[in-house]
Amino acid sequence: MTKSIFKEGFLWGGATAANQLEGAYQADGKGLSVADAMPGGKQRWSILAGEEFDWRIDESNYIYPNHTGIDHYHRFKEDISLFAKMGFKCYRFSIAWSRIFPNGDETTPNEAGLHFYDELIDTCLNYNIEPVVTISHYEMPLNLAKKYGGWKNRELIDFYERFADVVLKRYYQKVKYWMTFNEINSPFELPALSMGMVKSNGGGVWQNIFQAWHHQFVASAKAVKIGHELDPNLQIGCMIIYGTTYSYDANPTNQVATMIQNQEFNYFCADVQVRGKYPAYVKRMFEKYDVQPLEIKADDLALISAHTVDYIGFSYYMSTAINETTTAEKVQGNILGGVKNPFLKASDWGWQIDPDGLRIALNELYNRYEKPLFIVENGLGAYDEVDENFYVADDYRIDYLRKHIVAMGQAVKDGVDLMGYTPWGCIDLVSASTGEMSKRYGFIYVDKDDEGKGTFNRYEKKSFGWYKKVIATNGTDL
Ligand code: BG6
């Protein structure tokens, strides 16, 4: 076999999040999460982007795709057996906070919720699949958003710490890889899912968002502390969205704007979580966003500094281009914004496909932090068409993933320390930004449509066999 550029034990796998696939949204004592309050379709995007919203669930007018997800809660054994068939070395999933603490502010966890994750984790381990756990992935208990106003409230630190303490203590002997918050930098655009903050509870105010971030940084440091005290070998990472950012042209005004976008969006959160301190440019950010000094308690900065993360997990889907000097068409419908890059094609949702951007992302992150990197999300959301046997010939997905894996290999040759690769939505699931089922990422097709209709049966797509071969050859046969 050709020698692989990827290290031995490279973590090939796939990634999901509880709220997007489990369904069973009220089973066995589970409480409602913020994601459970998100309707499918266009309404969801406007809520995420800050429209007035009071967390009301209105089933007579809207559908709520997360309520049934893909029913992974009842079918996880079949799903994990399919992951094993592909040869997954690891599986990234999240623990639904509201299964463990239904309202978020209880003092005792819900044993039935923990029982589900006992079984899920044991099933992975039986197949030699390493679990990779995101503690909080866009699914905080709804009560914490409604009653406490989300993460701008300092009390959230204690609630999160209790949750992290319970799951870390229960699973640290079985789970080595953890991440504290999914895409912690996403509130620049979408504070609803990760901070529980919408316009009606202050989500449109930068002061609140930065205060909420501070609370998340402290909470994350506390989780790292708990984990490392249990076992210093646990690998606990941060998780950011990385959007490689180009200046549209050589105009220094655009170059400066690109530098600023990089600092704010790509680096701010990671700088705090990896380097253990607020970066120097935060002063300028606070001025720009009209943020008064944050409420910081005596021990906060020492905690943040003492308990930094072991690795950087990140999602990479696309790049963006910055143009402040001429009129160029804006990109619609993705979190990075920016303008259309004439050299790139985009997905049907306007996400600009850019494998070279992944090589750049890996180099930029590694050379800035010199910490191992883990690509914990990447992939192509696409409309899949099934034939009469429910087979999807998804060559476009294979093409996307192949090019991104080639770019990963180039980055490893550049000297980057890359731990693993878990493409997003390895089994079709509910889209986070639109609530659609028809925005599919999986190697496994799930028969469910945007209205929630279908058998929920699982079918292997063409990419299933392709990815199996990639894993079996440690990325040499693409
Ligand atoms: C990431 C999130 O932003 O992108 C996932 O961590 C999400 O939860 C994924 O599903 C893809 O986005 P979307 O909107 O296509 O589901």
Image (tube, rainbow, N blue to C red):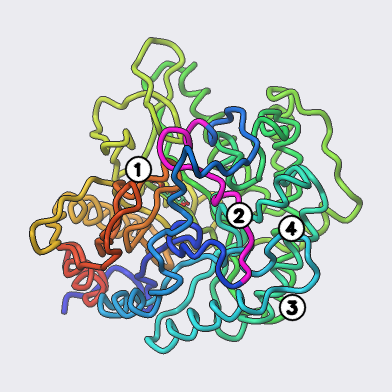
Q: Please, what is the three-letter code of the amino acid marked with disc 4? A: Ala
Depth check, mark 1 against mark 4: the one in front is 4
Q: Earlier in the sequence, mark 1 or mark 3?
A: 3
Marks 2 and 1 sit apart, C-alpha to C-alpha, by: 34 Å
Q: Earlier in the sequence, mark 4 or mark 3?
A: 4
The residue carrying pointer 3 sits among few (fewer than 14), some (14 to 19) or many (20 or more) residues within 10 Å by Cα, namely: few
Name the secondary structure under disc 4. Answer: helix
Could you say where residue 430 lies in the image, as x and y percent from the top left?
39, 52
Residue where numbered disc 3 is placed: 229
Residue 462, relative to residue 291: is it above or below?
below
Marks 4 and 3 sit apart, C-alpha to C-alpha, by: 15 Å
Residue 120, relative to residue 417: is it above or below?
below
Could you say where residue 224 lies in the image, as x and y percent from the top left?
69, 67
Marks 1 and 3 sit apart, C-alpha to C-alpha, by: 37 Å
Residue where numbered disc 2 is placed: 33
Depth check, mark 2 against mark 4: the one in front is 2
Q: Earlier in the sequence, mark 1 or mark 4?
A: 4
Q: Earlier in the sequence, mark 2 or mark 1?
A: 2
Q: Which mark is residue 357?
A: 1
Depth check, mark 2 against mark 1: the one in front is 2
Q: Are marks 2 and 1 in contact (CB under 8 Å)?
A: no
Q: Earlier in the sequence, mark 2 or mark 3?
A: 2
Name the secondary structure under disc 1. Answer: helix
Q: Which residues are magenta?
A: 29-46
Marks 2 and 4 sit apart, C-alpha to C-alpha, by: 19 Å
Q: Which mark is residue 219?
A: 4
Depth check, mark 4 against mark 3: the one in front is 4
Q: Residue furthest right?
A: 298
Q: Residue furthest front?
A: 60
- Give the side of residue 209 with respect to residue 117, left or right: right
Q: Earlier in the sequence, mark 2 or mark 4?
A: 2
Based on the picture, tell me whether residue 40 belongs to the magenta stretch.
yes
